[in-house]
Image (cartoon, rainbow, N blue to C red):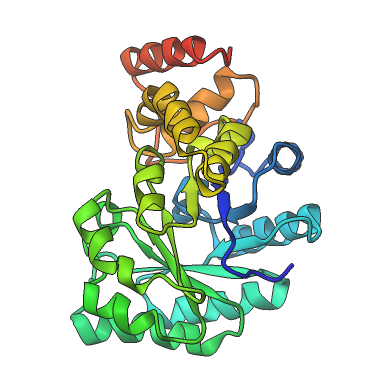
Amino acid sequence: MKFENIKGSIVAMVTPYHEDGSINFEVLTELLERQIREGTDAILTLGTTGESATMTHEEDASIVEHTIKVVNGRVPVIVGCGSNCTATQKEKGIQYQNMGADALLIISPYYNKANTEGMYRHFAETADAVHVPCILYNVPGRTGCSIPVEVVERLAKHPNVAGIKEASGNMSYAMKIAHCIGPDFALYSGNDDITVPLMSIGGSGVISVYANVMPRMCHDIVMDYLNGNQAKAMENTNRYLKLMNDLFIEVNPIPVKTAMNMMGLNVGPMRLPLYDMSEKNAAVLRATLEEAGLL
């Protein structure tokens, strides 16, 4: 399926594991079918929520292959190929493109960071190397570096850069790049709690952690807003805002996988260095799920 400025809810998929830490492809199939059945507009695999940082390149490829096969063109599949090594990001981007990815999510270079020109080239050379659309990923809380506004402005003009996942939580930053939004460059919220505010400045939706738990509601919030029913979108956001926030009570994806296990979705454990939630936080999360009618 061709990726063309998709609007709506894009789920950042978790990766389910068996208790021994191996990938649980049977549950992954069930999760993908659930997302499509519940109206999710696109699938993101190998994002932060998918724990790709703890998987081998071979495991990454197996997840991509399985996801594309199961989805079978019913919705677009976006694949995270980000790396702090530009050559690796390009290599993985080409590989996933050739496997059938509809778009790629590419990240700012964590740990080594970059100066302004290096940051631009890190993204631009990746976008030059592939022919599927690329989405920038700004998440300074993870990477230690934000994509400078002037770099976003330059990249928004690149014919193969289709948008940005803005996950800084900084509305001032979002306002500074909002003028880049147009037919060829979309803004997606990377934070569920501010999806509606970002859509108010022209955003196309969300790349969501919360959608793993309530895919239909996440889709409905976005589409209600985009279809002119802003009051209902805000009402449902406020209704489930505590749940959205509690899914970050510890570092993502620990809370969302814990919540899904509580709901009987059997996504299994995390891989180290991620570990089980504290009992205190797990109790808070369970109470929030109960309040939301999910248990």
| 222 is higher (above) or lower (below) than 262 | below
Residue at 22% over, 60% down: 173
Could one spot residue 109 in this view of the protein?
A: no
Q: Is 111 or 163 nearer to us in this picture?
A: 163
Residue at 26% over, 84% down: 118
- The image quarter containing residue 100 is bottom right
- Provide residue 65's location: percent of width, then percent of height: 72, 61
Residue at 49% over, 45% down: 208
Please state if 150 lies on the left or on the right of 178 as rendered: left
Could one spot residue 96 in this view of the protein?
A: yes
Residue at 52% over, 54% down: 55
**Which quarter of the rendering shows the C terminus?**
top right
| 268 is higher (above) or lower (below) than 37 | above
- Provide residue 186's location: percent of width, then percent of height: 46, 66
- Provide residue 157's location: percent of width, then percent of height: 40, 85
- Provide residue 202's location: percent of width, then percent of height: 40, 59
| 223 is higher (above) or lower (below) than 278 | below
**Which quarter of the rendering shows the N terminus?**
bottom right
- The image quarter containing residue 85 is bottom left
- The image quarter containing residue 143 is bottom left
| 98 is higher (above) or lower (below) than 173 | below
Q: Is 248 or 266 nearer to us in this picture?
A: 248
Please state if 14 lies on the left or on the right of 181 as rendered: right
Please state if 240 lies on the left or on the right of 122 as rendered: right
